[in-house]
Image (cartoon, helix red, strand yellow):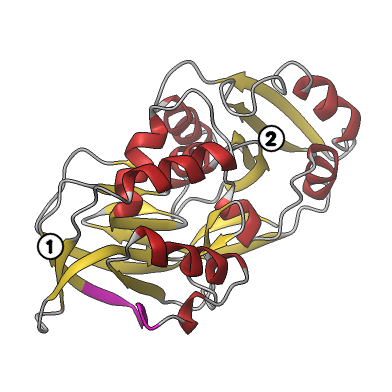
Amino acid sequence: MKKHILFIINPISGVGKKNILPDLIAKYINQSLFEYEIVFTQHKGHAEELSAQAAEKNIDVVCVVGGDGSVHEAGKALIHKKTALAILATGSGNGVARHLKLPLNLKHAIKRINDFNVKKIDTVLLNNQPFIGVAGFGFDALIAEKFDQYHNRGLMSYVRLVLKEIRYFKGVNIQINQRKSTENILLCCIANTSQFGNGFTIAPNAKVNDGKFELIVIKSAHIFTLLPLFVLSIIGKLHWSKKVSIERFKEVNIQLKTLMCHLDGEPQEEIQENNQVRIQPQSLNVLV
């Protein structure tokens, strides 16, 4: 019996690719193994709605075509469900896909689906809101909010935005598990996967199936000290910096005052001062 795949395509992500995707899917998906349908998202949150409906119908695979935001939407609807998540990465960062070592070339990524290799991975809850890759408070959340409003995506737009905003960022005060507070930090990240995307690694040793997440705190950095952090991030050695602390937890309490937070790069509107974070071990089926 053939397995059923629902392809959910974000038409905004990877502009220009949406017109060729149906032909690529028809050409490279193994139609003796799979039957499929294709749906284009119409609005923010639509991928989550479609994914939830697919899980209710016991569709075998939801394949999201987009960036980390689309993966976040579709994936969170499949947590603790039988339906597996597949990813065709067409976003500007593709942090989750890169961590899972999925092909970024669409032809190879579609052919990878034919292997139907399902792996259970962890997800994380921040105040009962799930995410798959990386969440954060502070400067990265500010950048996520600003970048979400950009029309020109891509690495260079991201770098220009970082260099512009770092000059004005005041830092955030944070307290972890009632310990002595740390003042004026640049950012606090909760990492289930290893990177933001585009090769910028925030948690070099993160694993998606070890039952723990990594908590990364970076002390506030001046624009002239940001370059070494960029370099260390690109080579996967951010933990070498004295400005960086990394701890591993199954559960943690984070107290801070900030209006900025993101989940998988998606800016969040409802921010709390007291934040509970906990792992959900092996809670999501993913095609790798």
For the residues marked 2 and 1, what is the alpha-carbon distance in whole angstroms?
A: 42 Å
Q: Left or right of 192: which side holds 244?
A: left
Q: Residues within 10 Å of mark 1 (few under 14, many from 20)?
A: many
Residue picked out by circle 2 = 5
Q: Left or right of 52: which side holds 85?
A: right
Residue picked out by circle 1 = 256
Q: Please state which amino acid type lies under the numbered disc 2.
A: Ile
Residue sitting at x 45%, y 66%: 192
Q: Residues within 10 Å of mark 2 (few under 14, many from 20)?
A: many
Q: In this orientation, does residue 208 appear?
A: no
Q: Left or right of 285: which side holds 213?
A: left
Q: Which corner quadrant holds the N terminus?
A: top right
Residue sitting at x 33%, y 70%: 218
> Image quarter for residue 62?
top right
Q: Secondary structure at mark 2?
A: strand
Q: Please state which amino acid type lies under the numbered disc 1.
A: Leu
Residue sitting at x 41%, y 47%: 162
Sooner in the amino-acid sequence: mark 2 or mark 1: 2
- Range drawn in magenta: 242-252
Identify which residue, 86 or 224, lies in the foreground: 224
Residue 222 % position (x, y): 32, 62
From this view, report whether residue 288 is shown above or below residue 162: below
Residue 94 % position (x, y): 59, 47
Q: Nearer the viewer, mark 2 or mark 1?
A: 1
Residue 42 % position (x, y): 48, 15
Q: Which corner quadrant holds the C terminus?
A: bottom right
Residue 133 % position (x, y): 47, 57
From this view, report whether residue 24 is shown above or below residue 165: above
Instruction: Name the magenta segment's main secondary structure.
Output: strand
